[in-house]
Amino acid sequence: MLKTDGALLASRATRVLLAAERVLVTTGAGMSRESGIPTFRDALTGLWARYDPEELATEAGFRRHPARVFGWYAWRRRLVRAAVPHAGYHALVALERLVPSLAIVTQNVDGLHRRAGSRRVLELHGSLERFSCVDARHPFPGDAIPLPEADTECEPPHCPQCGSRVRPDVVWFHETLPERVTTEAWDLAASCQAMLVVGTSGLVHPAAQLPFIARDAGAMVIEVNPDPTEVSTAAHIVCRGPAGTILPALVAALREGEGEGARA
Ligand code: APR
């Protein structure tokens, strides 16, 4: 891992991205921070501060207190609806056009990558905008679910097919990740030439394995995060700073590089 000044790191990162045919971007809660979306742990504020995450993000917690859990996700959904993708998101959309093959694997359930215009997005932990019933996971239309005005408990609807309560289609603790998305994400990590790891602490598994899979498969790993993380040891290049600043700078340098016909 090289620890020198920002410019040198950015140019090293640019050269790596210019040389890569297949780039994989993995993002965590830090990617959404500058759009005002609290990270999972930050979201335990106000009405929700007195609840243990296990209470709000497990099936058992939902079955015990459906209105409490449903209300918390409805509140987060309202926050996300009001958020605007920052410059870092738009930089990733631009990057998609600058490199032959790019995909984004995100732990975030806020849908901001798609809202910014990214085309190939794999949501490992699901989405706040999708719903299904708790017993049989029958899909349930999101637009049939109102957004509460305040952060308050609200009763979930019932599934018209089996009658069980409707839950958000996010991955809760002790639940497995969606199989198709996971298989594709692991394949992409094992076959990319460069991985950008943005805004994740690397504490949540199995998503935290992706940078190490990429590194072990010979890819160059670039971390974008203001603070050191569990991923920093896997990174060849570490860009210490916020996603909303670093990503646009990388894309600007890449465009310059492209201009000089630097692509391998
Ligand atoms: N730009 C880039 N990174 C940032 C920024 C920023 N502006 N602000 C904070 N970060 C970094 C923090 O330094 C931290 O390393 O983002 C990371 C956020 O870490 P976590 O809150 O642990 O989020 P994440 O790694 O995504 O894990 C959260 O766990 O709770 C589950 O499913 C939930 O997807 C969620 C996952």
Image (cartoon, helix red, strand yellow):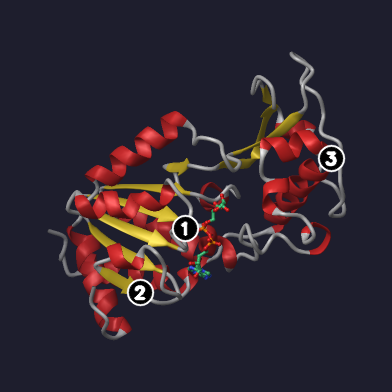
Lateral position of residue 146 relative to residue 28, left or right: right
Q: Of circles 1 and 3, which is in front?
A: 1
Note whether ligand 1 is within 8 Å of mark 1: yes
Note whether ligand 1 is within 8 Å of mark 2: no
Residue 236: percent from left, percent from top: 24, 67
Lateral position of residue 130 relative to residue 178, left or right: right
| Residue position marked by numbered label 1 in the rendering | 203
Residue 171 versus residue 80: which sits nearer the camera? 171
Q: Earlier in the sequence, mark 2 or mark 1?
A: 1
Q: Which mark is residue 239?
A: 2
Mark 2 crowd level (few <14, some 14–19, many ≥20, 10 Å Cα) = many
Q: Earlier in the sequence, mark 3 or mark 2?
A: 3
Three-letter residue code for mark 2? Cys
Q: Say whether marks 1 and 3 touch (CB < 8 Å).
A: no
Q: Earlier in the sequence, mark 1 or mark 3?
A: 3
| Residue position marked by numbered label 3 in the rendering | 67
Q: Secondary structure beneath disc 3?
A: helix
Residue 262 versus residue 128: which sits nearer the camera? 128
Q: At 57% across and 60% down in the image, what residue appears?
A: 85
Q: Which mark is residue 179?
A: none
Q: Of circles 2 and 1, which is in front?
A: 1
